[in-house]
Structure formats: C-alpha cells, structure tokens
Image (cartoon, helix red, strand yellow):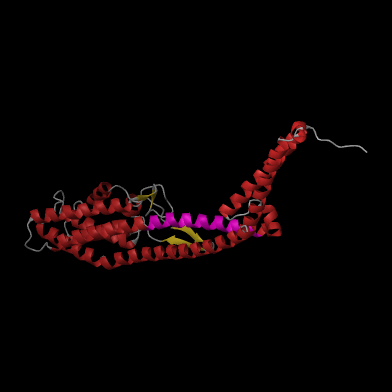
Amino acid sequence: MPISTIGDIQQHFLSSRNTSSMKSELNTLVQELTTGQASDLTSHLGVSQSELSSLDRQLQMLARFNQSNTETGQLLSTMQIALDNIEQHRADAGGTLLIISDSSTLSQISDAGRVALSGFEATVQSLNMRSAGRSMFGGADLDSNPLAPPGDMIDALKTTVAGLTDVGDITTAIDTWFDVAGGGFDTIGYQGDAAGFVQRPIDASQNVEIQIRADDDTLKDTLKALALGALAGDTDLALSTQSRQTLQQQAAEDLFSVAAPLASVQGRLGYAEGQVEEASVRNSAQEASFGIARNTLVSADPFETATRLEAVQLQLETHYTLIARLSRLSLTEYLR
C-alpha cells in the first residue's frame, strides 16, 4: 500500500497559506463588524445590484442639487445684501433731500446733491457686485458688469440736460434718458443681458428663475431719482436756485415713492430664496430616505458576522496550537 507523505517545505507552504487565508477572512469580518457593511457586495446583493446602482445614481444627483442649491442660496443672499444697501442709500438720500425747501441756500442744495450723488454711486456699485466672481444683476450675462461706471452715466446725463433751464424740460430729458427704449440708459448705462434671466435647477423637476436685473424699472427709478437730486446740486449746470430746489424736492418725492416697489423687488427675491430652501429640504429628506435604503441593502448582519468572527478566531487559534505541536515532533521526543 503506497504511503503519501508531505515534505517539510511543502507543509510549511500549506501552513502559511492557511494562516494567510484565515487572517484575511478575520480582517474582512472585523471590517464588516466595524463598518456594518458587507465587504463583497457582489455576492451579498445578488440580483439586488441594480437596485443599489439606482440608489447610488439618485444619491449622486441629489448631492449635485444640494451643491447647486447651496451656491444659489449664497447668490440670492448676496443679492439681498445688495438690495439692502440700495434701500439704505435711498432712505439716506431721500431724508436729506426732503429737508430742501424754498428757503434752502445754494450751499445746502450742493450738500444734498453730494449725498444724492454718493447714493447713486453706491447703488451702481451694489448692482455691480459679484458672487463667486459672477455678475448678479446682469441677467444671463454673468461676466460683464451690468452697469457702466457711475461717473460715465452722470456725465452722459449732464450732457443731456446741458443748456436746459426749465424744470419740466430737465425732468423730461432725464425720464427719456432712463425710460425710452434705446435711450441713454439702454445704450450707455446697462451693459448686461436684456433678454433673459438666470435659471438654476433646484430639484429634478423644478428650476428657480431669478427675475431681477439692473434694468428693472424699480431699480431704474431709484437711480433716476438719485441722479435728479445729484444733478440739481451740481454747480456746473446753469440752474437757478429755485429750479434746484424744485428738482431736489421732486427727487425726494420720487425716492420715497420708490420705497414700496423696492420692497416688492426684495420680496420677489425672497420668494426665490424660499423656493430654494423648500427644494433643499425636500432633497435632504429624499437623500436621507435613499441613504437608509442603501444602508439596508449593503449592511452585514452583525450577529452573523460576530458569530463567523468568533469561529474564524477559534479556528486560527487552533491552527497555531497545532503548528506549535507539530514543530516539536521528532524521533527524540517520541523515544522519551
């Protein structure tokens, strides 16, 4: 009868392979018990792999929406800050111009004009503010400043009213510059996109449209009233003191008249902020739901894993014990 033998070297290799295999399985089970997730998802899921792939796609899409909504929220928040600044300058200039009366001196008129000019410049700067390097009030044009430098617009307006002395003619000329299509504001003042608005996706089925540009009628009326107050106080223009007083009184009325429409613009922006916030809440709820479903699919049974871990640990300990005993076997030991 033939006798099968295993050489010492071959036995060493077999022992090392078994040890390595058990250690690898032990490490895998420790990882599964620690993370709660099966290490071999292919065998763990079986036919449910397509369900996991679908959940992963949904989670990736929601993550993109969440990132986009965060950026959109920051954009809208910065736009609100710009509108708050404009409202503050409108109120300051309006309050200063309101003091002008028929008894106001040229010096007082000039001071009020400087306040109005400062408000005009600050309003233009606010509308030219950027969020993440992109223009906010230029419609679909995210690169250009929506408004020309304030000095350029004031110079153009001064040229428009130069030589006019009648209050009605001056206000009509300024109205025409700002309001008539193809007029000074359209050709010199506004440099953004005049046709469209910024649209941003907030979930799988809804976009938010930011319908506020620097050529919005309310914002133009604000700029127009500030410009009127500034020009009335400009000593370069040959105007009588009475005309200056009348123009600044008109500018004060216009600035207070635009307060409610300006608040409405802020309300429209606030509505867009609410849409983004509601979509973010919905997306977060869906993300949590899909995350729970995914964890259920890929999770390893902790009781089963712990049982297997204990079994492999015992097997490895037994293996080491046998190796130790085999290493002590010799003819001398047997003869003892």
* Extreme-front residue of the structure: 336
| Viewport quadrant of the N terminus | top right
Residue at 38%, 60% in the rendered image? 212
- Which segment is the magenta one? 51-76
**Closer to the camera in the image, 99 or 207:** 207
**Closer to the camera in the image, 7 or 115:** 7
Give the left or right position of residue 87, taking residue 2 as reference: left
Residue 158 on image: x %, y %: 22, 50
Q: Main secondary structure of the magenta part?
A: helix
**Relative height, residue 10 to residue 62 (above, below):** above
Confirm whether the magenta stretch covers residue 57: yes
| Viewport quadrant of the C terminus | top right
Residue 5 on image: x %, y %: 83, 35
Does residue 164 appear anywhere in the picture? Answer: no
Residue 216 on image: x %, y %: 35, 60
**Closer to the camera in the image, 284 or 117:** 284
Residue 214: quadrant of the picture: bottom left
Give the left or right position of residue 68, taking residue 174 as reference: right
Does residue 103 appear anywhere in the picture? Answer: yes
Residue 50 on image: x %, y %: 67, 58
Residue at 69%, 44% in the rendered image? 319
Residue at 41%, 63% in the rendered image? 272
Residue 219: quadrant of the picture: bottom left
